[in-house]
Image (tube, grey):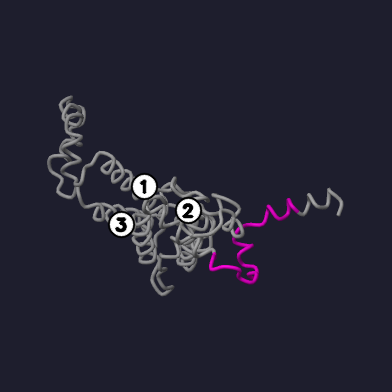
């Protein structure tokens, strides 16, 4: 085969996505290894030790296979991460298509939060990861908006607004939990005590009277689910009012 033709075939293969390859008929199994098992073990490692602990060599050790075995399915760490993201979103049960747009959005938001908190390393992955299970979430969002007669651009803007709220709120929640873990704080009270010297000085400047009122009067400081739900309702109320739906 001419070198130029061989190079062209190699380039074409490199452009085929992981998901397209996995849709093709599987070769005769030579071991118990599978994309699902690879993803499950990688997710277990990330859940226990963080995303940086997931390497192809560590994965092979945990799977009990040769270091190169997983490369039959993934080309490297990037595709492995795709498998992991898809595995995690596979845990998210989509609401049925009989719910209205608002209940669908609310249910997806709450379930996405639960899944992301269960796997905090997901905060380091792209919200735009294109995997089958990940893409099923915006598909359900868009489908529930489609019946309202909105144009395609507006539907996507609404979907992304809810998604941005969910990921922004959960990322902040995970960030606080990570800080608490690093500092050895086990509760909101311990966290506030640890931050007290800096906060006390800032409040003493008199520049933040409304924030100070919050610190003195708020009773839901340690209720992140309540905070998330209130914020979500504000987002949905705004969409409903703006769209007249």
Q: Which residue is drawn at 33% across and 47% down?
A: 174
Locate the N terminus and report the quarter of the image it occupies.
Answer: bottom right
User: CA gap, disc 2 to disc 3?
Assistant: 17 Å
Instruction: Report which residue position mark 3 lands on.
Output: 233
Label 1: element kind: helix
What is the C-alpha distance between the residues marked 1 and 2?
A: 21 Å
**Sequence-wise first label, 1 or 2:** 2
- Residue at the spot of label 1: 171
Query: Where residue 113 appears, x then y in whole percent?
Result: 35, 57
Relative side of 26 to 184, left or right: right
Residue lying at the far left of the rendered structure: 216
Q: In which quarter of the image is residue 52?
A: top left
Q: How far apart are marks 3 and 1 (CA)?
A: 18 Å
Query: Which one is in front in this view, the residue at disc 1 or the one at disc 2?
Result: 1
Q: Where is residue 25 in the image (x, y as percent from the top left)?
A: 65, 71
Image height check: is 238 above or below 25?
Answer: above
User: Is the Cβ of the residue at disc 3 closer than 8 Å to that at disc 1?
Assistant: no
Secondary element under disc 3, as helix, strand or loop, is: helix
Query: Horizontally, is 64 left or right of 71 in the view?
Result: left
> Within the image, what quadrant is residue 244 found in?
bottom left
Residue farthest to the bottom? Answer: 98
- 99 relative to 133 in the view: left or right: left
Labels 2 and 3: the sequence-earlier one? 2
Judge whether residue 31 is colored magenta.
Answer: yes
- The magenta segment is 10-34
- Please report the residue visible at 48 percent of the width from the left and 57 percent of the height from the top: 84
Local packing at callout 2 (Cα closer than 10 Å; few below 14, some 14-19, many 20+) is few
- Which residue: 19% across, 31% down? 199
Q: Are marks 2 and 3 in contact (CB under 8 Å)?
A: no
Q: Which of 44 and 213 is in front in this view?
A: 44
Q: Name the residue under label 2.
A: 157
């Amino acid at each position: 085969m001419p070198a130029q033709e061989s190079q062209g075939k190699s380039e074409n293969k490199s452009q085929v996505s992981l998901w397209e390859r996995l849709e093709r008929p599987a070769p005769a199994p030579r071991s118990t290894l599978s994309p699902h098992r690879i993803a499950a073990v990688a997710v277990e490692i990330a859940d226990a030790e963080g995303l940086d602990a997931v390497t192809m060599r560590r994965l092979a050790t945990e799977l009990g296979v040769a270091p190169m075995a997983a490369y039959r399915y993934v080309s490297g760490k990037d595709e492995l991460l795709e498998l992991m993201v898809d595995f995690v979103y596979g845990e998210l049960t989509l609401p049925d298509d009989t719910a209205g747009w608002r209940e669908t959005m609310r249910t997806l938001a709450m379930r996405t939060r639960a899944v992301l908190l269960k796997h905090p390393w997901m905060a380091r992955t792209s919200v735009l990861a294109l995997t089958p299970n990940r893409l099923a979430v915006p598909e359900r969002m868009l489908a529930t908006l489609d019946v309202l007669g909105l144009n395609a651009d507006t539907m996507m803007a609404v979907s992304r607004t809810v998604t941005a709220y969910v990921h922004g709120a959960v990322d902040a929640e995970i960030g606080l939990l990570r800080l608490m873990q690093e500092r050895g704080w086990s509760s909101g009270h311990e966290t506030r005590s640890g931050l007290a010297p800096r906060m006390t000085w800032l409040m003493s400047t008199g520049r933040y009277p409304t924030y100070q009122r919050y610190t003195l009067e708020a009773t839901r400081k340690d209720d992140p689910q309540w905070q998330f739900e209130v914020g979500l309702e504000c987002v949905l109320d705004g969409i409903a009012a703006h769209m007249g739906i």
